[in-house]
Image (cartoon, grey):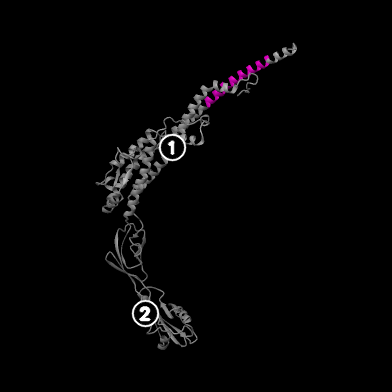
Amino acid sequence: MSVTRITGITSGLDTESLVKTFSSRYSVKKDKIWKQKQNLQYKQDAWKDMNKDIYNLYTNLFNNRLTSSYQKTEITSSDEKVAKVSGNNKDIKMQSLTVEQIASQTFLTGGKVDRKEPVGVNGNLKVYVGGSEKDINITPDMSMEQVARKLTEAGLVANFDENNMRMFVSSTKTGKDSNFSLGGDAGLLDALRLGSSATKTNGQDALITLNGVHFESSNNNFNINRFNIEAKSVGSVSIGSQSTDKIFDIVKDFINQYNTLIKKIDTAYNTSAKGYDPLTAEEKESLNEKEIEEWDKKVKDGALYKDETLIDISNSLKNIMGSTSVDGINLRSLGLTLGDYFTTEKEERGVYQLDEDKLKSAISDNPSKVINFMTKLSDNLYKELDKKMKSTSLSSVYTVYNDKQMKQEMKDYDNEISKWEKKIEEIEDKYYQKFAQMETMLSSIQNQNNYLTNFFGM
């Protein structure tokens, strides 16, 4: 229990400063342990951040080990302006498709009329469409717009264009079976300019050639072998589920992720915080905010300096990257090379430079070999990290560093600091008690002296 602390009221001594001086050697020992604990805290934080990146690589490697990851399950077209392809038949490899013609409606463009209303003629129009016949009664008071509506009601699409003074008629469907014709009173057809003065274009089916075989469709859509083709325009394309673009993207993404991690690891391993320790509250009092921030950054950046676990991971990954080879394929043959050891900065020596053209060429020449190499490389890296991330008495599962051990060490430091704080409190109480006794004695002597002075009238 802390005693009541009385300052030097009678003696005039700076009791608090004296007590701090007497207990300073204990405070130094406590601060030393606190700094060790803070360094461990920074190391723990640095490892948590590093472990997150290592685990992300680990999970991505799990997918990259699988051949199916490099293959597109969706069928695609090399030019969707010619043909759009959809479906999930992953067994469809690259095939050739030619769109010979696209499906179209039957169109009839009427001749130019003198007036839009009234038509001034009467009679009967016959509409032949879809194997059926429909009659339309035309009266002299009708307008061309009304005639258009009658044709539409009969199963066609008709519009009158006032700007060009013509009737435009088309079928509701595409294909050769969409053909229609107009009949009835010849004089009425001529008056409406839907007879001999009209121009007609019959509808046609879409025609495609897939791998040398011809197919027809009335509506530009084809369903062949569990995938769909929509003909858009005349031309030739390649279709299939195998896309070398996906292989390239996976390789490039993997290298970018690996490079970022290995540079981070090597930078942390080679960054020293020599001469810098965590600052106590007292030490911060002599520095400004910016100086404190810069000091703390140096300490944190050097938290993993020369860490044995870190360099072990770095060396393991580098060895696998450099030694893996499958059927004559390795990283160098894919356009991935390291910089010159003597001219490259330490943290950059494990970073691969990518020649994208060389990688694309290798994939184009033999995509299967590239896939086999990447699955093997990913499997080797995955197994190595999996081994390092297993749970032990010192570390948790999916953790490459001794997190359990660090937690226990943090508790040990806390207990040690508490002991020293208690010891400091006890020694300070001891000295404060002595000073209090001294102050009491001095006060008593002073009171006696004052009494005698007053008694003798001095």
Q: Nearer the viewer, residue 145 or 184?
A: 145
Res 428 seen here: yes
User: Which residue is pictured at 70% across the width and 15% down the height?
Assistant: 447
Q: Which of the 4 image quadrants contains residue 171?
A: bottom left
> Is 286 rendered above or below residue 197?
above
Q: Which residue is mark 2?
A: 200
Task: Kindly report the secondary structure that dominates the magenta region of the rendered protein.
Answer: helix
SS of the residue at dot 1? helix
Q: Quadrant of the C terminus?
A: top right
> Is 146 rendered above or below residue 376?
below
Q: Earlier in the sequence, mark 2 or mark 1?
A: 1
Task: Residue 283: give x, y in percent of width and height.
Answer: 51, 30
Q: Amino acid at mark 2?
A: Lys
Q: Which residue is mark 1?
A: 46
Q: Is 45 on the left or on the right of 385, as rendered?
A: right
For label 2, the crowd category at 10 Å Cα-Cα, with few meaning under 14, some 14 to 19 and many 20 or more, is some
Q: How many marks?
A: 2
Q: Nearer the viewer, residue 31 or 294?
A: 294
User: Which residue is pictured at 33% across the width and 42% down the height?
Assistant: 351
> Is 201 rendered above or below residue 451?
below
Res 43 seen here: no
Q: Which residues are magenta?
A: 418-445
Q: Quadrant of the N terminus?
A: top right
